Image (cartoon, rainbow, N blue to C red):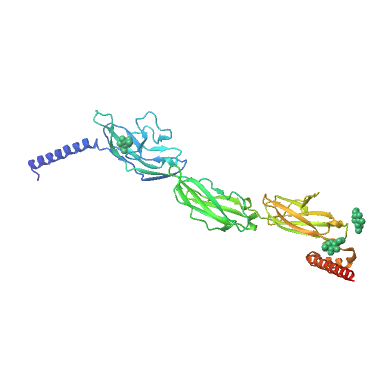
């Protein structure tokens, strides 16, 4: 059984509770809350950054803003009250009283930073300064930027086989900092120095990688490849460099006289073989005892299978008697370098020693000729000595 007093007490309690509830409701009207849920946002350069912020409850009058950075150096990105919004910034839900989400279009590396959704209230009216009432936890924005197409540079001047030259591969404007570089000579991976990654423009990085290459004759057809790998790339970026651009293979020379021993007034064909050179620009001239000979037909360089060139130049010389022992020189200027030369001699067979000379000819005459010449000189000296001896004897008688 419940007594009247007990009933009254219960009424009082209910009333009391009701009163308290009303008070809480009145306070709730002031219980403003701001939610900025994202801690990190990553977007590709050129994309759209979406920054979420919602509010609930009520607060004293004052603007809602988005700030980039906190403390000194902060920047107002969006201001609810501003008549001129920033060009790339729009509200996701225009005019909403509770959703303050913004979008920043055409994201740039410069947009990187921490963004805060902030509720300001008017200060006591004396100053027109707005005071921070509540702020979100901040959203860290990173803009991922792709590295620029790599640039591959080599030495300024051509280098010859066995020489070591350096090549440099550079790229820039990327974010994040981590980047991979690989080098290949044709299909073979190469050992390169540790790439240098430096700060580029605003929040971006540049990379430079160097590789040393010892050139070879066979590199005319080789290519160097710099491969750049970055988190923003689906496929690595590659830049190629034809080693022929920096390679110079000097020719080796060979001069032949055909026939090596000729009868007087016949013609001798001198052949200059300019072997295995690169690049193709070469000029050949002929000299007879140091004086230029005119050559009618200038032959063109022939490309060999390995990409090197070869050239054959010929000159015909009339073997008049006074030309015996003449030095015929093939002079080659390759790729504007110092001239190189090789010589052969014109030898006229002694009419009296026809058979002998023929024999020498069959026996690779050129190499034996100097000894033959020496032999003849010796012969002449002996003959001279004999004459002198006879002459002396005649005088003494
Ligand atoms: C933003 O920067 C201004 C100027 O430096 C400064 O007066 C203000 O207090 C800063 N605001 C915040 C929220 O850090
Ligand atoms: C070679 O030619 C010259 C001039 O043409 C001539 O005088 C000489 O007799 C010739 N010698 C021989 C061996 O034919
Ligand atoms: C040419 O010179 C060589 C060597 O001096 C000599 O053996 C030869 O007899 C010469 N030929 C003539 C035709 O004089």
Q: Is residue 316 above or below residue 359?
A: above
Instruction: Choose between 284 and 227: the one closer to the eye.
Output: 284
Q: Is residue 10 above or below residue 185?
A: above
Q: Position of residue 181 (x, y in %)?
A: 51, 53
Instruction: Choose between 77 and 397: the one closer to the eye.
Output: 397
Q: Is residue 161 visible?
A: yes
Q: Position of residue 210 (x, y in %)?
A: 52, 53
Q: Residue, x 36% and y 45% (percent of image)?
A: 39
Q: Name which quarter of the figure residue 380 lies in.
A: bottom right
Q: Position of residue 132 (x, y in %)?
A: 28, 36
Q: Is residue 362 visible?
A: no
Q: Which quadrant of the figure contains the C terminus? A: bottom right
Q: Residue, x 16% and y 37% (percent of image)?
A: 19
Q: Is residue 121 above or below residue 153?
A: above
Relative placement, left or right, of 307 versus 172 is right
Numbered disc total: 0
Instruction: Choose between 8 and 277: the one closer to the eye.
Output: 277
| Farthest-out residue, front | 397
Instruction: Choose between 220 and 279: the one closer to the eye.
Output: 279
Q: Position of residue 221 (x, y in %)?
A: 64, 54
């Amino acid at each position: 059984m419940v007594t009247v007093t007990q009933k009254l007490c219960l009424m009082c309690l209910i009333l009391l509770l009701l009163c308290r509830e009303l008070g809480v409701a009145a306070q709730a009207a002031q219980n403003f809350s701001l939610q900025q849920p994202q801690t990190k946002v990553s977007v590709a350069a050129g994309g759209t950054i979406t920054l979420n912020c919602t509010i609930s409850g009520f607060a004293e009058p004052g603007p809602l803003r988005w700030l980039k950075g906190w403390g000194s150096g902060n920047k107002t990105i969006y201001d609810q009250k501003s008549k001129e919004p920033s060009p790339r910034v729009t509200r996701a839900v225009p005019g909403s009283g509770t959703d303050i989400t913004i979008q920043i279009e055409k994201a740039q590396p410069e947009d990187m930073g921490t963004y805060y959704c902030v509720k300001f209230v008017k200060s006591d009216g004396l100053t027109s300064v707005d005071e921070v009432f509540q702020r979100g936890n901040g959203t860290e924005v990173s803009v991922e930027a792709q590295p620029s197409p790599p640039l591959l540079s080599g030495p300024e001047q051509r280098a010859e086989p066995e020489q070591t030259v350096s090549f440099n591969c550079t790229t820039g404007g990327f974010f994040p900092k981590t980047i991979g570089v690989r080098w290949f000579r044709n299909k073979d991976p190469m050992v390169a120095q540790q790439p240098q990654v430096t700060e580029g423009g605003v929040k971006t990085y540049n990379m430079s990688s160097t590789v040393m290459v010892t050139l070879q004759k066979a590199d005319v057809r080789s290519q160097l490849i710099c491969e750049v790998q970055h988190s923003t790339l689906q496929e690595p970026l590659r830049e190629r460099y034809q080693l022929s651009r920096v390679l110079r293979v000097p020719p080796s020379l060979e001069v032949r006289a055909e026939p090596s021993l000729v009868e007087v007034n016949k013609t001798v064909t001198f052949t200059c073989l300019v072997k295995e050179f690169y690049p193709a620009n070469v000029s050949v001239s002929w000299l007879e005892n140091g004086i230029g000979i005119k050559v009618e037909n200038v032959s063109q360089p022939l490309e060999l299978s390995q990409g090197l060139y070869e050239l054959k130049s010929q000159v015909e010389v009339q073997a008049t008697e006074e030309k015996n022992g003449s030095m015929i020189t093939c002079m080659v200027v390759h790729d504007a370098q110092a001239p190189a030369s090789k010589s052969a001699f014109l030898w006229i067979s002694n009419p009296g020693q026809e058979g002998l000379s023929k024999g020498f000819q069959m026996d690779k005459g050129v190499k034996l000729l100097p000894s033959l010449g020496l032999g003849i000189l010796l012969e002449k000296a002996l003959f001279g000595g004999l004459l002198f001896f006879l002459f002396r004897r005649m005088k003494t008688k």
